[in-house]
Image: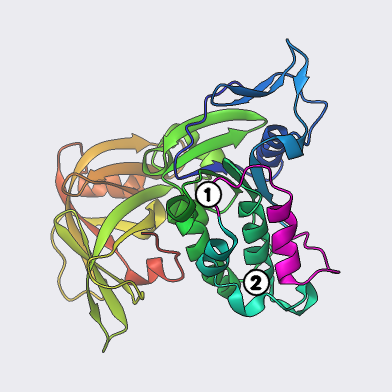
Amino acid sequence: VEENIPLENVTALFGESGSGKTTLLRIIAGLEKKAWGKVALGKTYWQNDETKTFLPPHKRSIGYVFQDNRLFNHLNVEGNLRFGYDRSDAKNGVRFNDVVDALDLSNLLLRTPHSLSGGEKQLVSIGRALLSGPELLLMDEPLSALDAKRKAEVIPYIEQLPSNFSIPVLYVTHNLEEVTRLAPNMLLISEGKIAGKGKVEKLLERIDLWSVTGRLAAGSVLNAEVKTHLSDWGMTVLTVADHELRIPAISSPPGTFVRLRVQAKDVALATQKPVGLSIRNILSAQILSIDIEKDIFAEVLLDIGGTNLRARVTREAVDDLKLATGRKVYALIKSVAFEGQLFAK
């Protein structure tokens, strides 16, 4: 790997198991002593084999959150938090009470790790990493061991870390829902190499990267604004470009900006606006391109008012509907396609 990684907000390192995501994170942290090359934060080299420079992990300005929480069972929550804080040479302006308040840990300080839920343990782990005063926070699949409920509880706290503490985050995951929720930028890692990098929404719609992102998960990331809530129906109305989109109700208030992922397999096409249909989301669109695959499918890229949306249909449908570049169509998306998604600000 030879790459300059921009450190702003959250950058996701995404790839399938065994692709090298965690290894890259461990190299940055100084946990892989056999790794060869150079690692630098800004102009400060943490590793440079040409000058035989190698800073051990505790000398690098990093905080590391592992998949397993690795808390000290003989210490209570406050003791675990202060372990990193009291040993930090550079606090970087991070104060103990600020971290406790930001992560809602005040009611947990006197409890022991074995009495905490999985989500609470991870919040304490994040707090301890922050209190070590890092310039960079490394997170290795911190939500992978949590069930859906605990994951939903923890992820808003992770989302706010860059803004609350002015610290960039490198976030390892193989979960695209987490990527959509947390990360504006992404590195795609495959077989130990970086296969692609850039904005999440651009990478996920690229056909040439589906060997990494996964064909079945391929689609589009849409930026939307919460318009209103239809409480009687348990629905939320979003504004996307010039369109309204109805999804299962979320708690974000009107005016909140969210991101959501639409899988190509969940988008159907019609050449005329359908009536008498249960599908609530019918968006006028124009075909930008059609890529015919070797099997039964075709990938259709749509413009829905300045925003791209990808649909997967059969080659038979392309021929039967006479779909072609430039043709105006309607994109149909079931509201249920968004059920269970993690929505981002």
Q: Relative to 268, say whether 291 is above or below.
A: above
Q: Secondary structure at mark 2?
A: helix
90 inside magenta stretch: yes
1 vs 2, front mark:
1
| Circle on res. 183 | none
Q: Give residue 273's position: percent from left, percent from top.
A: 13, 62
What is the crowding at mark 2: few (fewer than 14 residues within 10 Å), some, or many (at least 20)?
A: many
* Dot placed on the residue nearer the N-terminal end, 1 or 2: 1
Colour logic = rainbow
Q: Amino acid at mark 2?
A: Glu
What is the crowding at mark 1: few (fewer than 14 residues within 10 Å), some, or many (at least 20)?
A: few
Q: Residue at x 23, y 46 (%)?
A: 307
State the extent of the magenta-drawn residues as a range. 69-94
Whole-Å distance between the Cαs marked 1 and 2? Answer: 24 Å
Q: Nearer the viewer, residue 33 or 327?
A: 33
Q: Quadrant of the N terminus?
A: top right
Locate residue 29 relative to residue 225 in the image: left or right. Answer: right
| Circle on res. 120 | 2
Q: Amino acid at mark 1?
A: Gly
Residue 216 visible to an observer of this rendering? yes
Pointer 1 residue: 93
Q: Quadrant of the C terminus?
A: bottom left
Q: Nearer the viewer, residue 123 or 297?
A: 123
The image quarter containing residue 153 is bottom right
Residue 19 visible to an observer of this rendering? no
Q: Nearer the viewer, residue 28 or 269?
A: 28
